[in-house]
Image: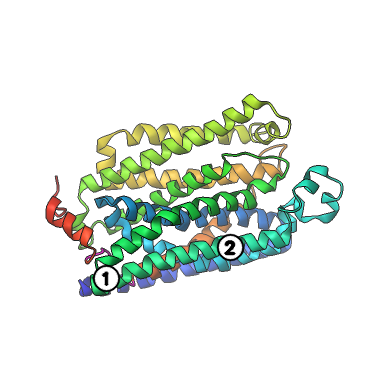
Amino acid sequence: MNGLDTQLTTELAPTIRKFSAIGGAALLLCLVGAFVDRQQFFRSYLIAYVFWLGVPLGCLGILMIHHLVGGTWGFVIQRALESSTRTFPVMVLLFAPLLLGLPDLFLWAHPEVVAHDPILQQKAAYLNIPAFVVRAVFYFSVWIVLGFLLTRWSEQQDRTADPTLTQRLQTLSGPGLVLYGLTVTFSAIDWLMSLEPRWYSTIFGMIFMVSHGLVALAFIITVSYFLSRREPFSRLIAPWVFNDLGNLLLAFVMLWAYMSFSQFLLVWIENLQHEIPWYIHRLNGGWGAIAAVLIALQFALPLILLLSRTVKRKAATLCAVALGIALMHQIELFWFVAPTFHPDGFAIHWTTILAPIGIGGVWLAAFLSELKKRPLLPYRDPRFIAIVEEQGLAQND
């Protein structure tokens, strides 16, 4: 086992350097773009940041669900989930540039605008820069503490095989999911919904909670595919394990579609002047074409493919579907944010393409650095040991 982990560390080292170099170069180019068009830089950076933050956030939620419900699929991806949650400190550093661009992104960050807008004045106690920063600190504190405790206790179990740590992980995961739901909901309100502060939706936070889970699961499936030919994964990750992950991905796709359509339906039926313009801006001037693409490629096509048992049991095919879903989520975020600043028609900037590459390169390097630090499977978790003995994970069915 130790020899295999050492080999993995050696193999990942050049990949980590490549991701770091690509990410750093892309961010430097985006920084050059900031001197040319400061506002556009922050808009592109926000879209990219929220996308990549969704991966560790979704992994944190899935990890706590795994500790509560168990299941073979969870033990196979547990190390990847834990490694992802350990990247929150990196995401804090990457969040810092956004604090410099609050006036470039948010109307409520301009006192002169608030002074002449009765609606913004009513929301001023919540939507102001000091409160925004304090809430962001709270969100990251919750996520970092939850991720740290879950991975710390799992690491202790690796060393000591103490069965009581399992109960500790389960005890934390219950209230942890409540805190997770609240912080993700309010962070979505702060960082995205308040881009148009006159608009509101009671289901907006839930949409992003599900979206984070969707993109995180897509990422984890991709990681599992690339590890599936490596020992001990080659003996443990049977086709039916990918089938379970595919079923879970299908459930998230359907839940995302339900939440998104529910918001659209409720806003349209209520016919309120402060809610409908948000959708009008995103259905006219070329933006409607993106909405149609999202319906087709983030819901309809994945739904059809994931209903097939054959697709879900073939790791390469499932990985391709997962990557397609992740790409569509990036486009969805672009569709959420960009029409706020370009309501008259479709517009895209080169920094919108480079920013996800930059942040993604840095984040992936941090993720792989964490992944190589520990065994790829929780060998000393009593639940995992029992499943291996009782169900024979090493056998392909």
The crowding category of the residue bearing disc 1, from other C-alpha atoms within 10 Å (few below 14, some 14 to 19, many at least 20), is: some
Task: Specify the quadrant that holds the N terminus.
Answer: bottom left
Q: Would you identify the image quadrant in which residue 355 lies?
A: bottom right
Residue labelled with disc 1: 158
- Is 128 on the left-hand or right-hand side of 79? right
Q: Is residue 221 left or right of residue 340?
A: left
Which residue position is annotated with label 2?
138
Type of amino acid at the residue the image marks with label 1: Asp
Q: In this view of the protein, which residue sits in the foreground, 213 or 151?
A: 151
Residue 385 in the image, given as x and y percentages of width and height:
18, 60
| Residue 104 sits inside the magenta stretch | no
Question: Is the residue 47 above or below the residue 361 in the image?
Answer: above
Q: Is residue 33 visible?
A: no
Give the residue drawn at x 26%, y 74%. 159
> Magenta part of the protein: which range?
373-379
Q: Nearer the viewer, mark 2 or mark 1?
A: 2
- Asked if residue 249 lies left or right of residue 385, the reply is right
Q: Give me the disc on residue 320.
A: none
Q: What type is the residue that disc 2 sits on? A: Phe
Say which quarter of the image contains residue 232: bottom left
Instruction: Label 2: state its secondary structure.
Output: helix
Q: CB of mark 2 within 8 Å of CB of mark 1?
A: no
